[in-house]
Image (cartoon, grey):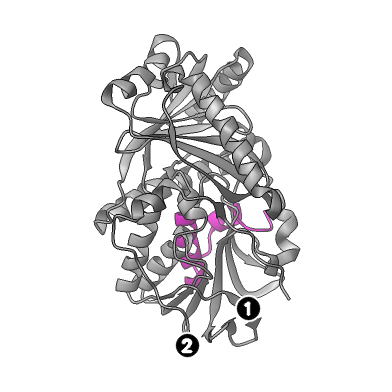
Amino acid sequence: MTPPVPRLRIDLPIWLAHERSVVRERFPPLTRDLQADIAVIGGGVTGAAVAWRFAEAGVNVVLVEGRRIGRGSTAASTALLMQEPDEDFTALARRYGAARALRIWELSRESTHEFSATLDRFDISCDLQPRDSVYYAKTARHARELRSEHRKRVRAGLRAAWLEGAALRRTVGFDATAAIRTRGNAQVDPYRACIGLMRTAVGAGARVFERSPVTAIKPSKRDVVVRCAHGTVRASRVIIATGYATPYFKPLGARFRMLTTYVVATRRLTLSERRKTGLDDVMVWDMERPYHYARWTSDRRLIFGGADRPLVPARQRRQALEEGTRAVHADLVRLYPALADVPLEYAWEGLFATTPDGLPYIGPHRRYARQLFALGYGGNGMTFGFLASRLLLDWYRGNRTKDHDLFAFSR
């Protein structure tokens, strides 16, 4: 028997707490045998994007989710739609060369913009807001590294504004040494974005089922059968959009490092309290590893996260949550002392997978016939998940390019 899948989050994220005030989306469980062109396993943002894109292209799609749609890692996300991968341009260029690194960044930027445009196109209500990101350094050593990173980005043709001094303080609200400001990013409510995109997929013809954990995947020369407790899906291909290699794919586990991130959110601030922080309408993240990140919500709550650590055993996760969110709150107050007496209303953690180069795996694996994967997004789950939907549709149609090689298991 396959080992149990770990919970993808602990405690109630702000998005699900707010969701109580809106209509709760329900999808039925799978209770019969179905035929499809493509079966999708995973009901987060990636699965929703895949189901929508394939269905809109006229492909017969069935999606199954073991728990509830959008309530795993997606709901734990801080939903920064960022074009910058977790690895700096410098690191990717060192590993793969400047031309390939540039293409990775271009694809990430295109995905960020296309995702935002898609949410607009279908009028998906998810608090989508354009935001610049500010990537900052607090030490002289990090500032030198950041200056070198900025020069390499500009030399490659990537837009990147340099910030320092008073201009930087006016933007982030505290003293930092230097920063790169990147335009064209965005933020959303990840749960509503996922549900809205899944509704759109259903409208395009996709069939979606939740509370239907997969018990087996049986490929043959002609097709593949996905077995659930009370039904099956027989398809030409199956797409694994679970975010990481679940225990069912144990041989792939060594390619991923499972990390837990910790997030807190303040109560709604008054206008005066918000002004005292000095933080502008930007998303900020630092050069520390693990890095910290912050963003505003539309109702003036400040979300702050970080303190990433390797996944601990299940019995220790509650204690780790308390320790992690306490550490994150302390870091928040160090940056913004004006928030010292402002209570937190939400604290949660989420599980995500990273890879050695910070890039996802998108495409087939020689060990698994008739199966395509979209796994290991790191901190850019929404951006790379949406990119995966496009690359996988191209692959399915036979339009395979050098872009697929950038994210292949064999890279």
Highlighted magenta segment, given as a residue range: 385-411
Q: Which residue is at the front of the view, 252 or 258?
A: 258
Instruction: Tell me: residue 335, above or below residue 301.
Output: above
Q: Which residue is mark 1?
A: 215
Q: Nearer the viewer, residue 337 or 395?
A: 337
Q: Is residue 109 left or right of residue 410?
A: left
2 and 1 marks in contact (CB < 8 Å): no
Res 363 → quadrant: bottom right
Image quadrant containing the N terminus:
bottom right
- Disc 2 on helix, strand or loop? strand
The mark total stands at: 2
Looking at the picture, does residue 141 appear above or below residue 392? above
**Residue 9 picture location, percent across and down:** 55, 53
Majority secondary structure of magenta residues: helix
Is residue 1 visible in the rendered image? The answer is: yes
Vertical side of 99 occupied by 269: above or below: above
The mark nearer the N terminus, 2 or 1, is: 2
- Residue 105 magenta-highlighted: no
- State yes or no: residue 403 in magenta: yes
Give the percent coordinates (x, y) of residue 126.
31, 51
Residue that badge 2 annotates? 34
Task: Name the residue rendered at 30%, 41% in the picture.
Answer: 129
Q: Name the amino acid type tagged 1.
A: Thr
